[in-house]
Image (cartoon, rainbow, N blue to C red):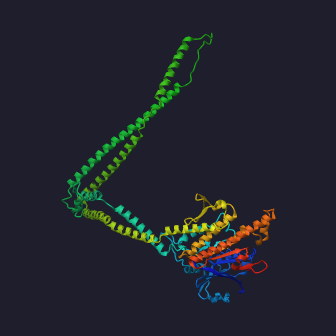
Amino acid sequence: MDIYISRIFLFNSLGEVKTVKLNDGLNIITGDSKTGKSAIIEIIDYCLFSSRSTIPKGIIDNWVELFCIVLKNKDKNILIARPKGKSVNRNKSYFSIETDEEFLKDFNLSYFDNIELKDIKENQAEFEKHLGISVVDARIDEDDDKRIAGSKVTMRSFIPFLFQHQNLIANKHSLFYRFDDHYKRKKTIEDFSILMGWENSKYFMLKRELEEKSKRLQAEKKIVEKIKIDNNQLVSQLYPLIKGYYVFIGQELEENLPLKELKAIALNLPDVTKKSFSNSEIKLTRDKYILERNELKDNLYGVLEIIEKLKSNSDLSEDYNGTLVRLKSFVSLNNKINDLTCPLCNHEVGEITEKIKKVSESKNKLLEEFSKIGTYTNDSSKQLEGLSKDRDELKKRITLKSIEISKIDKQLEEIDSDSTFFERAYVLKGATKANVENLIDRSILANSNPHLITELEDEIKRLKGELSGYNIEELIKEAEIKLNNKMTEICDKLDFEKELRPGKLIFSFKDFSFKYQFNGKENILLTEMGSGSNWLAIHLSVFLGFLHLISTSEKSSIPSILILDQPSQVYFPSQYGKLQVQEIEEEFNDESQLKVKIDENIEQVKNIFRVLLEEIESVFELVKYRPQILVLEHADEAEFKEFVNYRWKKDGEKLI
């Protein structure tokens, strides 16, 4: 999106102002440490409606009362200002639009006297309208809570594309600003397609309508399935209803009637009369039911007898096995006796010894027989299980028969003695008729519902057709290819390890994951690479690639702005500080080698600036405007002096 930061204003309580003026294209603020360069990122972030201030505590925070930025969008100037983080109004902001740049002349604190100080969320929403961020509800399902993350698209989701802090620009563990926060990472990924203009309010409206109609379709299909009755089912449900009424009024209903005749009877149920309700008919029905119940009871007694016998046999088997075990235990007792001698004369008693040997042989044979018998058992549990089910079913049928007999008994009691019998018969007739009509209506409804289902299916087809016009998957795929090619092209120009070439940088919009595909085969993660120059090359390639993609996407709502904080820190050239020189000198004993190393490092820093300029101009050739790149650096090369906006010194000019 063609928008850049043209001014940064810092006002103190006395109305004094510090101004940082910037342009589109390349901007460089160079100078010593602790002159306020890095604070620029935090000031811009705070003015872009950050929920909290991360501006460093100290000189800046103590001096400033109001932070202000002006963004230039073609002929429109967007002004955002916020009281400092320690102010009671830190959650409020000023917002205004100016089309004439005359307001920048003699711009002072009194400008805000006529502007209302509003809640930052209110002004953020207004700013988002100017950026073209109009999706206020990105839910797919209307039943989801509107307050949940992801429902409203926010400009805060594009902040990670704008900044590369000095502790991030060559970081091997992370690419994006504040991606250590799970919510912010998730929100950025979810909102990216919307911020790129691939998805809009109508898209989500169609998605919600599709979700709602898909749910309705499923619900209608379930209803049809639930109420659907085929002819056989209808007969099986109509017959007992009519049969119940006929029994009550003492009439017989013919069995196996076709559906057509059943419907005719159901819609013209006979009235109850004294003649139709004779004792003999009722009693015959009662006698029939008692006979059937007695037969069921006989069957039940038979089943119960078999169950008892099986259980008894099982117990006998267990007793038998137990007896065998006890006998075996008794026989197994060690009664070993050797040859016997007379205790008086000490002579061997051969006759007794021989008898003992025969007893021992008999015991051994008995043990052998026991071993043959083993623990033979017969499992009758399956039979018992089946018989138990038969028993339960018979009990159930007996109970139902008893209920029918009880109903007839009550009818017999009421025939002559209860004058309300006929009233109850008419009530039963009405209830039977209503139930019959309900069944018939369900059958008709089940046959008519497909028309509604067809309408919903046609609507779903139409919605899917409209959604396919957005071509989201293809747009994402094309953007990934474009981004990956551009990142790889940029990386080839930077100081990237030769041993890892040839390779391709690959980024996925699905989960914002990055990998380097080495030699077309091996995938290497950023954390698996060595050398600060490699990490720096990857960060610059990724963010310049995104800047190119964002700037050349016609519907993008992401500002074409990139702020880099000290990309030269990896190389530490001599001109950029005594500490860096000392660190480099410690690596080399030979003075000529030291000079070569310093010259190489300086050349790499120059190359970074050349690549930045080339990418700015490549975007300009395509869209006729230059994205803004702001570099906060120690470097101050003469080759790029035309792009140096400020040179800040500790003892000279600086931010505060």
Front residue (pair 493, 77):
493
Q: Position of residue 42 (x, y in %)?
A: 67, 75
Quadrant where the N terminus sits is bottom right
Q: Position of residue 104 (x, y in %)?
A: 65, 87
Front residue (pair 93, 410):
93
- Find residue 646 and report its image quarter: bottom right
Q: Which residue lies at the image location 42% right of the left edge and 70% below the top edge?
A: 465
Front residue (pair 323, 464):
464
Front residue (pair 182, 316):
182
- Find residue 491 and report its image quarter: bottom right
Q: Position of residue 512 (x, y in %)?
A: 58, 66
Above or below for 613 versus 116 = above
Q: Which residue lies at the image location 78% right of the left edge and 68% below the top edge?
A: 581
Q: Which residue lies at the image location 33% right of the left edge and 68% below the top edge?
A: 451
**How many tags in the picture?**
0
Q: Which residue lies at the image location 54% right of the left edge and 16% below the top edge?
A: 357
Quadrant where the C terminus sits is bottom right
Above or below for 11 versus 343 = below
- Is residue 118 something that shows in the picture? yes
- Answer with left or right where residue 284 lies relative to residue 60: left
- Answer with left or right where residue 151 lies relative to residue 104: left
- Answer with left or right where residue 482 lies relative to residue 455: right
Q: Position of residue 566 (x, y in %)?
A: 70, 71
- Is residue 178 something that shows in the picture? no
- Find residue 492 and report its image quarter: bottom right
